[in-house]
Amino acid sequence: MSIWRKVHVNKKAHAWEGDIPIYFSYTVGPAGEKFFTALKEKGVFVAVRCRQCGKVYLPPRIYCEVCMEDVEEFVEVQPEGRVVTWTEVTRDSRGSLLEKPELIGFINIYNTDGGIIHKIVAKDFSKESLTGAEVKAVLKPPAERSGELGDILYFELKV
Amino acid sequence: MGLNIKHKVAVVGAGMSNVMRRAEETGRELSFYAVKEALKNSGLTIEDVECVVMATAPDAFDGVHMKGEYLADGAGAFRKPYMRSYVGGGSGVFAIIHGWYMVASGMFKTCLVVAEEKMSSAQPHPQAAFNSIYDHTLERPLGVNLLWIFALEMNRYMSVHKIPLEDIALVSVKNKRNGLDHPCTQVGAEVTVKEVLESEIMAWPVHRLMVSPTSDAAAAIVIARDDIARRVSEQPVWIKGVGWNLDTAFWTNRDLYYPDYVEKAARMAYEMAGITNPRKEIHVVEPYDPFAYKELHHLEGLLLADRGKAPELLKKGVFDRDGELPSCPSGGLLGVGNPIAAAGLMKVCEIFWQLRGEAGKRQVKNNPKTGLAQAWGDLMQVGTVVILSVN
Ligand SMILES: [Zn+2]
């Protein structure tokens, strides 16, 4: 009997509506700068290789999380890879139905130990074959790119 | 307090990033810088680290919910037991207490303790995040911000003891000057009492130069069980006592002129360390100084000055670097910067360096053997204390 009563309509009880009046300016850090600059200017991804353990990080970082050492061997890789796993979403984060379902995939980028999560556009796909499928990024035209995730429009099946 | 502690525990390494506003680095990267430096001088490697403790204050500063988890890889916690410590501003010193537990209990032989804050992500100002730590129906409708409580508390402290503003301004002068010698400083400066008192009044009696800044930074220490510490370190710095205490979060239910909870935390730590006369047995102290009067307030709570008498000792030079009881030789939050959780651990780092004689230009002159670091925060009612010693 610890709850006194249920409030069906908040206004019936004394309530004060408030929010946390704050927004954010996030920096991407030195490695993030390299990634987004290369994406914008060259249309490629930047990864980084740890000299000690050989792990290739994408997105790149300035340190190896295993060795806790600086990593400096930045390499450019093509924005292509394989679908590790995927889902088809039907509702947005507020719970509204999407106009049409969207494919979201985790794509391992070739020659790296990491990857990226992004939209996949595939007209004809079978649930059986999408996992493991080869995909490549479709980018905005160079003049429209601003160095952010949205510069990648989606990934499409490689044919 | 029934003490049945399994192991002696020492700090064997310390490190920190630069302190600045608007760092390009992410919080993870700031954490990495601190960890790398702490490991480098610890005699241990990341493989030797058995567990990791992370202190970081409200998620709303960095703008990342589950910030502890977000920071884990930069803190060296990849596939290790990892826990976040959190008592707001008091977190930096709470974290070493947490790390001490991990090792003193016998659970782990080593622990890496990291503290991080990236306040400049918060826009238009971190005050917007502070607003929502207050009671949503009783206080927030007034548009309260952090300066208010400090102003009310400072005014109460000054009124009860009849302390003139000039005396409190001296804290800013001392700490900002000390901060000039800190390689990581954001706000070290040579200022005069006159300049402090002529700076903008932000909320009476708080002047701009009595307030610590918004900062980004990380700090880290490596702690180890006694057998490991003696093996890897020529001069382990022992954790002799820990204490922490929380008062009511209703600020209308306590008299703000004296921090009882800091005294309780201090007494707990003194008892554990076997200290009966702190004014003789503590040789260097880093009390939490986010606002100028807070250093004095806390020195009194720590029983290192009589109530209302810390300003007189300050005027006599007792708390200067070459005084009898150097206080905030690092420059503290007013002289280095205030990356909330990292600020407390930064104070622990300073005591570590001072006790090992490694503080360089900041080195105090009284050959200290035992020192104390204290942080404060949460809803302005937590005190966290650690006593370190080379003996
Ligand atoms: Zn590595």
Image: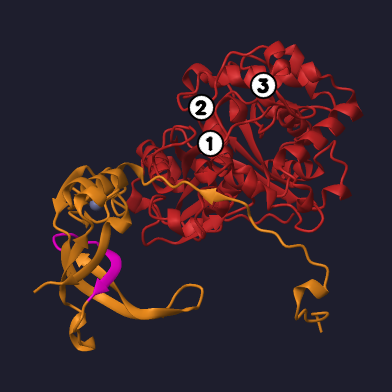
Chain colours: A orange, B red
Q: Residues within 10 Å of mark 3 (few under 14, many from 20)?
A: many
Q: Position of residue B32 (x, y in %)?
A: 38, 44
Tell whether B249 sits left or right of A120: right
Q: Are marks 2 and 3 in contact (CB under 8 Å)?
A: no
Question: In this picture, is B211 found above or below A25?
Answer: above
Q: Amino acid at mark 3?
A: Ser
Could you say which disc has been placed on residue B215 in the image? 1
Which residue does the numbered mark 3 point to in the structure image? B172
Q: Quadrant of residue B29?
A: top left
Region in magenta: A109-121
Magenta stretch: residue A120 in it? yes
Question: In this picture, is B188 found above or below A75?
Answer: above
Q: Are marks 2 and 1 in contact (CB under 8 Å)?
A: yes
Q: Looking at the rendering, in which quadrant would you find the N terminus of chain B?
A: bottom right
Identify the subunit bearing mark 3: B
Q: Secondary structure at mark 3?
A: helix
**Of callouts 2 and 3, the N-terminal one:** 3
Q: Quadrant of residue B307?
A: top right
Could you say which disc has been placed on residue B22 in the image? none
Which mark is in front, 1 or 3? 1
Instruction: Check mark 2 vs ligand 1: CB closer than 8 Å? yes or no.
Output: no
Q: Amino acid at mark 1?
A: Ser
| Residue at 57% from the left image edge and 19% from the top image edge | B178
